[in-house]
Image (cartoon, rainbow, N blue to C red):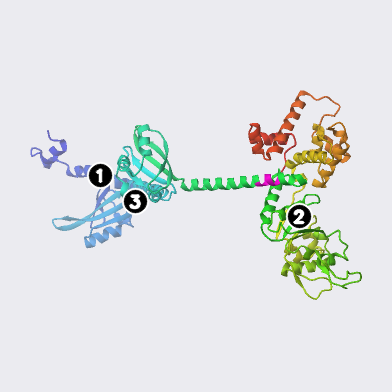
Amino acid sequence: MPSPLSQLLFDPSVARHHIDWKAFSRAMLNATRNGVFAVDGDGTVVLSNLIIQKAFGLFPGTSLPATLPGFWPEVENTLRDHTYRSEIPIQGETGSFLARVSPIYWKSAPVGVLCVFDDRTELEKATRRMHSYRELSRELDAIIDYSNDGLWICDGRGNVLQINPASERLNDIRSADVVGRNMQELVDEGFIDRSVTLETIRTGEVANLLQINRAGRKLMLTGNPVFDDDGLLDRVVVNERDITEIDALRRELEEQSALRDGFRDHIMELQLTELESNRIIARSPCMTQALKMALKVSGVDSTVLILGESGTGKGMVADLIHKHSGRTDRPMIKINCGAIPESLVESELFGYEKGAFTGAGKGGKPGYFELADGGILFLDEIAELPLSSQVKLLRFLEDGEVARVGATKDRRVDVRILAATNRNLEAMVEAGEFRRDLYYRLNVIPLRMPPLRDRRECLLPLIHHFLAHFAEKLALGVPPRLTRRASDALMAYGYPGNVRELMNICERLVVMTEGGRIDMADLPGDVAGPAGATAFCPTPPDEPMTLAEILAAVERETIAEAMARRGTQQEAARALGVNQSTIARKLKKHGLNCD
């Protein structure tokens, strides 16, 4: 059965002269989503649909030049040259449009213009969406292409859709060689030994594996499943991370760790050797670093300036450098520049010729520089060297030659200089008390010895060592034992005289203590005073200890002993079966922590 519209237009039984064609044409125009109107040669609107009427108020009989004066020239041109025009932008009340203008012919003669306005609002929205999609696509492509990690994107059946340049580089392949192929094919052909993509497809979960590819690189692969709205596997994204360099770095770190362990063993061997002469105990990082630096500079002939407070062991470090240097079989002459009268410093250091001054020996005398030829000259308390002698020392450091007092000829000697001082040479230079040029010549390799107050981890081992040493030296048998309060007081004391003062205190305790037990009453007054006696001992000596205090004392002694034996918090924690953070907390609690 024909539709009403077909019947209306094509059924011969319908009398077409009864159809209201004007109304029918308006219905046809209103059915389109575009704005449509027609104007005659004078610019009068003769026909328009609802879209045009609402957007521009162009009703039949309306003057186009008066209503849309900006658009009228386009229509007027078409009326004149009968040429089709398009893409003319028009802004209306309900939106923006693009106009097309076409001439209307009737019986081969132009009678007006038909204007069609395309609503571009939806088009602009679609364009913006497409632009947004393009921007998003570019961003995703940039992320994929510029990622340092390799990326493989496969569909839910394991077909390769895309790989990025990083994957091409890591696997030494071209994208064209694998895109479109199935991962199972690549495994069957031996291209890879196994596929994380296939494992992800099999399990539907994130999968990880290690793989060594054909290029010999070790890769860490992670496959991530991507599901669609229906919960079906849609994509598999595989991330490839090259861990070849990480493995190489790990091996390098292991080698460096082995070197550090070897150095630590060397330090321990060195300590065992030097303990016999009461020289070296290093448990704190600052002291270990100083010894490490001393050993490092031992193998070269550079001048070393040893800095530090009195009693910190500057002479001991000088001996250490000499022992491990290439001059160990040659002499090391030690001079205390502050112990020589100023009038004799020059002659003692550089020697003198026969008759150089009243009282000079008949045959002259070589100075310490000549005596140290081929070896090392250790100038202790270098800050006390008179300015006149500083000039000659500077000359030797510059050209390696010395001149005896009264001599007319220089002598060349091969001597390495080690200098030490407990004074601030920079301040002396600014005050004009020490030559600036000599300071820079001496300060080639500065080596700073830490004071005992900065070596808290070394303190308890030093105390036990010196007690045992002096007990053996004085043939007193077993060294006396420290009570907890006495140990706390000794640990709390500041030791302004550093190791030298500690040695004196330990010798005094060994000699003066009776009964094999050192308590607060046996300590020197400045050590057992209010600051030292109460630093770690809130309970008076005569008062009985509570169970909590006894447990705290045992804990403190145990941790202190572990730190003394192991040297570091990590090693002490490992020995006691606890975390390093626990050791750090207990050290702080008991006042044993040190920088």
- Residue 420 within the magenta-colored segment of the rendering: no
Q: Can residue 151 be seen in this snapshot? A: yes
Above/below status of 213 relative to 203 = below
Q: Residue 107: image x %, image y %? A: 13, 56
Residue assigned mark 2: 307
Question: Which numbered disc, 1 or 3, marks the residue closer to the eye?
Answer: 3
Q: Badge 1 local density, few (<14 within 10 Å), some, or many (20+)?
A: few
Residue 5 horizontal side relative to residue 71, left or right: left
Task: Please tell me whether the stretch drawn in magenta is mainly helix, strand or loop.
Answer: helix
Q: Residue 529: image x %, image y %? A: 87, 38
Give, as a single range, the part of the protein colored magenta: 266-271
Q: Residue 281: image x %, image y %? A: 73, 44
- Residue 267 within the magenta-colored segment of the rendering: yes
Question: Which numbered disc, 1 or 2, marks the residue closer to the eye?
Answer: 2
**Which residue is rendered at x = 75% and y = 68% of the image?**
396
Element type at mark 1: loop
- Name the quadrant containing residue 276: top right
Residue 162 horizontal side relative to residue 342, left or right: left
Element type at mark 2: strand
Disc with the residue nearer the chain's start (1 vs 3): 1
Disc with the residue nearer the chain's start (1 vs 2): 1
Q: Residue 331: image x %, image y %? A: 75, 59
Residue assigned mark 1: 32
Residue assigned mark 3: 174
